Image (tube, helix red, strand yellow):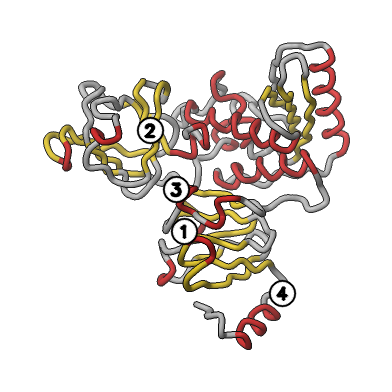
Amino acid sequence: MILQPSSFIFLVAFHIAGSAGENVTLYEHASSEGEFTTINLSGSECFNLPEDWYDRVSSIDTNNSCVIVWSRSDCSGYPERIAPEAEYSSNFQDLDFNDLIRSLKLCTSPTELSGARFYGVQEHNFFRQTHQTSSINGDNENLHQAAQNHAEYLVKNNLPLSSSKNQNLAEVIAWTEEEAVQNAVKTWYEEERHYDYGNPSFQNDSQHFTALVWNASSQVGIGVKWNPEKVRFVVVANYDPEGNISGQFEENVKLPKRRQPLPVRFYEHRFYEGEEVLMEVIGGCHNLPEGWENRTTAVKVSGWCLALWNQAGCTGKPLKLNYDVKSLVYLNFNDAVRSFNLCSDVYDSIE
């Protein structure tokens, strides 16, 4: 329902009817301009935009709520979290998410938590719900205290980090404890691009990711401490029950909901000419087949956000695409593609 500023009586009635949830307003143009629609969100319910609002939203007023927006209906596709007072909420062009929204929902996180603990639980659940994994709670004070004690112990003794099955560790640069915890969780999730879903098992280069999304883990404890020697924060996450259990990976590490088989076409020449190769992305990192290394000039990504890399294994120099490209020459990436994965695998490690 599109609401005009003159629709005062209807707006009041809508607000009263939807007072049980949180109202957010979506705008057609940047800076909260143009036509708009107000949506009432509650709990973990997913709201699909009306068809006339598909791929149309350019800015949002979250009314001090945390909202996750999605590029596909039913809260699938590529997600972005819009936190309260986010600078880019007034212009999704700055987020590379302009005219891409089709569904949205509230972030889920225990309201009684505060500070670093709140952001730690919230960040975990942001990624866990993407993998159709149960939400994790942060209401175990003993688990939080154990994580905090360990963070302080590591800093006091200036020890190197060594994760275990029920624990994730990270050293990160940040301005605040809250930002440090957010950066740490994102860093752990970046390992998802290395996880081989075809071989569900413990894998050294993705152990932090699998602990993060482990379905059987129902509690997380967060600890954070500034290390003046390394000029970094140490962040600790303890999990209960512990994850990364041998023989249980298939049922506990699930494919992301956004990862239905995604067709991607690579072309030898610009304007989609010459030979082509069709590949389907389901999860993790994909290397181009033999004979296609450093050969691609045009790409069709089918409206998804794809990260291209100039080295095998999704390493080296990246390029983010969320639209079809007729010629990589103009992006200084011609004949440079060797591997690729979905953008959310690298989160915001790509500028």
- Which amino acid does the dot numbered 1 rest on? Ile
Q: Which residue is mark 3?
A: 96
Q: CA distance from mark 3 to mark 4?
A: 32 Å
**Image depth: mark 3 or mark 4 in front:** 3
Nearest the viewer among 239 and 73 is 73
Secondary structure category for the residue under label 2: strand
Residue 248 on image: x %, y %: 60, 31
**Image depth: mark 3 or mark 1 in front:** 3
Q: CA distance from mark 4 to mark 1?
A: 24 Å
**Res 40 → quadrant:** bottom right
Residue 292 on image: x %, y %: 22, 25
Mark 3 crowdedness (10 Å alpha carbons): few <14, some 14-19, many ≥20: few
Q: CA distance from mark 4 to mark 2?
A: 43 Å
> Residue at the location (49% across, 33% down)?
346
Residue 188 vertical placement versus 96 (above, below): above
Which mark is first along the chain, 3 or 2? 3
Q: Which residue is mark 2?
A: 319
Secondary structure category for the residue under label 4: loop
Which mark is first along the chain, 1 or 4? 4
Secondary structure category for the residue under label 3: loop
Mark 2 crowdedness (10 Å alpha carbons): few <14, some 14-19, many ≥20: some
Mark 1 crowdedness (10 Å alpha carbons): few <14, some 14-19, many ≥20: many
Horizontal arrangement in the rendering, residue 282 relative to residue 175 (left or right):
left
Numbered circle sitting on residue 19:
4
Residue 320 on image: x %, y %: 39, 37
- Which amino acid does the dot numbered 4 rest on? Ser
